[in-house]
Each structure stands twice: as structure tokens, then as C-alpha cells.
């Protein structure tokens, strides 16, 4: 169950849209909850087409949703997916936003695994079928470069490389305000939030998490950062930036200003995996892959620069 106050930036939106933006749940999952009477505004059950108003108390009762079906891979091409490199052992993709790394409960949209299956890529690794080849993940709302293992040896070697922190992961993030200091390290453990199950937080008993950042551009409304991850926890950059009171622009789940998000035309967090450097799991050759900003992030950054 999730309970939250509707922010000013979502005033007048449909309740299903507001619930999706505020919780991070998929629209299809919110629809299932609504069909079972699990959406309420100020204590009154509402249909998904109802309109919210700022200050209203929105409640999402997940228990109202029917039991999910078993997770399976559905071959489906994802619009905008790019292939940066491919051989017998690995494939490196340029993942667009609104695409999950792999199928999961509550998500019935496109995924990297589903796209590769539909495009004829053969993945032969251990692990659950819906996650075969997945050695790293990017959030649904995060775009950029990502590697998938195709062979068993590549899977094993890359999993260990990520555990040993020998893979270099570089992100660019547009965050609200001006981080102080402009270059720094955030070392704070991350675990599950006490509220919604899909949300993460800094917790006393969380897993060690280290984020390094440096300022690339400072503007009136937001700062563009280069971020290096020493660890790879779920939502790590988003949680850490929110913890220092500079959430990623557009990231309503972690406290971003909805008014700024609307002004920049952002419907997701401004976060992009720009670079991935690793050694090939079989040949040992040093490899480096990069990804350009997609149009939505590029356009919003220009708005920040020009205003």
C-alpha cells in the first residue's frame, strides 16, 4: 500500500497517470489496482479516469490487485533500442527509456531480454529464463549503455567483474540545485524503504553503496553531473542524490520538483548511462562503449542552459 499527497505539478491529471508518476508502478499495474477498487482520493474509491487535485491524499492499495501471472519472456521489439556491439559472448545495447532490463512482476512493457529474443539473438546462460544474460540492470526510466552476456562463460566472468568492481560505469545526471561540494563522494548504505516495496532508501542495515560525482555544468535551475558508481545498488544514484537534497530532475518518486519537471518536459528522471568500460570476458580485450543523450534529455538540458 502507498499513501502520498498529490503535488501541485500533477493537479488536474488523471488519477492513473498521477499514481504512476508518484509511485513508479507501471500503468498496467495501476489499472489492475483501479479495477479492483484499490485507488482512493481522500478516502473515496475512484475510477482510473478521475482527476486529482493538488493536496489530495492518494492511496494505492496493491493488495487489491489480482495475483500476478508467472513471469515469462515475451519477444517484443523495443522502439529505439540500439545494438552497439555483438559477438558470440556478449551484446552491448543502447537502451531507451520505458524499457526494462528484463520482464518482472507488474511490468508488461518491453524489455531488453524480450527485444533480443524478438531480434533473433540467442542467449544461453544460467539463471531464471526471464533474466538470462542479465549481469547488470538499468531502471526502466534510465537510458543508456548496458551489456548482456550471451554465453555461459561470459555470464560467469561478467558477474564476477561487476562484483569485483572492475567494470567502469559512468552516468550523467541533471540534478536540481547546486550540490555542495561541487565534486564529492556519497557513501551511504541503501536498502528497501519502509513504505512502498519498489522504493529504496538510505537505511542503517542497507548494503554498502558509494557514488562519486563531479560537476560538468552549473545552471540556474539544475546542475549536470558526471557520476561514477563504485557499487551498483537498485536506484543508487537516484537515492543518493535525493539524500543530499538534489534529486534527479523529473524523478518524482525521489522528491523532484514536479513544476520543474513539467517545465522541462520530463516524464522520467534525467539520468543516462553514457559510458561502460570492461574487459571482454573471453578474450580479455579492453572495451569501451558510449551512448549519446536521447532527444528528451537533450531537449530538457537545452532548456536549462537557455533559461
Image (cartoon, rainbow, N blue to C red):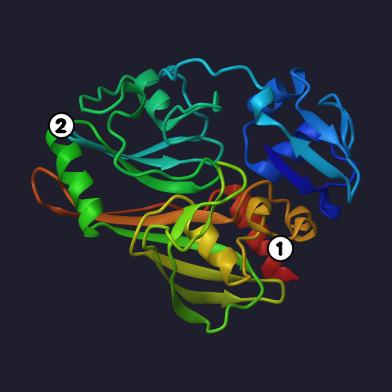
* Residue located at (21% from left, 27% from top): 126
Based on the displayed image, in which of its 4 quarters is residue 116 positioned?
top left
Q: Residues within 10 Å of mark 2 (few under 14, many from 20)?
A: some
Contact? badges 2 and 1 (CB < 8 Å): no
Residue under circle 2? 152
Q: Nearer the viewer, residue 292 or 99?
A: 99
Q: Nearer the viewer, residue 205 or 99?
A: 205
Based on the displayed image, in which of its 4 quarters is residue 115 positioned?
top left
Q: Give the CA distance from mark 2 to mark 1.
A: 45 Å
Q: Residues within 10 Å of mark 1 (few under 14, many from 20)?
A: some
Looking at the image, residue 278 sits to the left or right of residue 60; the answer is left
Q: Quadrant of the N terminus?
A: top right
* Residue located at (19% from left, 34% from top): 87
Q: Nearer the viewer, residue 209 or 214?
A: 209
Q: Mark 2 falls on what kind of element? A: helix
233 w.r.t. 18: above or below: below
Looking at the image, residue 187 sits to the left or right of residue 35; the answer is left
Q: Point out residue 16 in the picture as x, y percentages from the top left corner.
A: 77, 32
Q: Residue furthest left?
A: 283
Q: Point out residue 109 in the picture as x, y percentages from the top left corner.
A: 55, 26
Residue under circle 1? 303
Q: Quadrant of the C terminus?
A: bottom right
* Residue located at (52% from left, 40% from top): 140
Looking at the image, residue 261 sits to the left or right of residue 99; the answer is right
| Mark closer to the chain start, 2 or 1 | 2
Q: Residue furthest bottom?
A: 181
Amino acid at each position: 500500500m502507498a499513501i502520498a499527497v498529490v503535488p501541485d505539478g500533477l493537479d488536474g491529471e488523471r488519477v492513473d497517470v498521477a499514481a504512476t508518476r508518484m509511485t513508479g508502478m507501471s500503468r498496467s499495474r495501476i489499472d489492475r489496482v483501479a479495477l479492483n477498487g484499490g485507488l482512493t482520493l481522500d478516502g473515496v474509491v475512484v475510477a482510473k479516469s478521475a482527476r486529482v487535485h493538488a493536496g489530495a491524499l492518494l492511496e494505492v492499495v496493491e493488495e487489491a490487485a489480482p495475483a500476478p501471472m508467472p513471469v515469462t519472456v515475451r519477444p517484443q521489439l523495443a522502439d529505439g533500442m540500439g545494438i552497439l556491439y555483438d559477438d558470440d559472448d556478449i551484446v552491448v545495447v543502447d537502451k531507451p527509456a520505458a524499457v526494462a532490463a528484463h520482464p518482472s512482476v507488474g511490468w508488461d512493457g518491453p524489455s531488453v531480454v524480450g527485444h533480443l529474443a524478438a531480434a533473433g539473438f540467442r542467449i544461453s546462460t544460467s539463471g531464471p529464463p526471464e533474466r538470462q544474460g542479465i549481469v547488470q540492470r538499468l531502471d526502466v526510466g534510465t537510458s543508456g549503455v548496458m551489456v548482456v552476456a550471451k554465453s555461459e562463460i561470459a555470464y560467469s566472468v561478467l558477474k564476477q567483474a561487476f562484483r569485483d568492481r572492475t567494470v567502469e560505469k559512468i552516468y550523467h545526471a541533471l540534478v536540481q540545485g547546486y550540490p555542495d561540494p561541487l565534486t564529492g563522494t556519497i557513501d551511504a548504505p541503501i536498502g528497501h524503504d519502509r513504505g512502498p516495496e519498489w522504493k529504496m532508501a538510505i537505511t542503517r542495515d542497507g548494503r554498502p553503496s558509494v557514488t562519486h560525482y563531479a560537476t560538468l555544468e552549473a545552471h540556474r535551475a539544475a546542475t549536470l553531473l558526471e557520476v561514477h558508481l563504485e557499487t551498483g545498488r537498485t536506484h543508487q544514484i537516484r537515492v543518493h542524490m535525493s539524500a543530499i537534497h538534489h534529486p534527479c530532475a523529473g524523478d518524482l518518486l525521489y522528491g523532484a520538483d514536479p513544476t520543474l519537471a513539467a517545465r522541462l518536459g520530463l516524464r522520467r528522471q534525467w539520468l543516462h548511462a553514457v559510458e561502460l568500460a570492461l574487459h571482454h570476458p573471453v578474450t580479455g580485450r579492453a572495451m569501451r562503449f558510449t551512448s549519446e543523450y536521447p532527444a528528451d534529455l537533450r531537449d530538457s538540458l537545452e532548456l536549462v542552459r537557455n533559461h
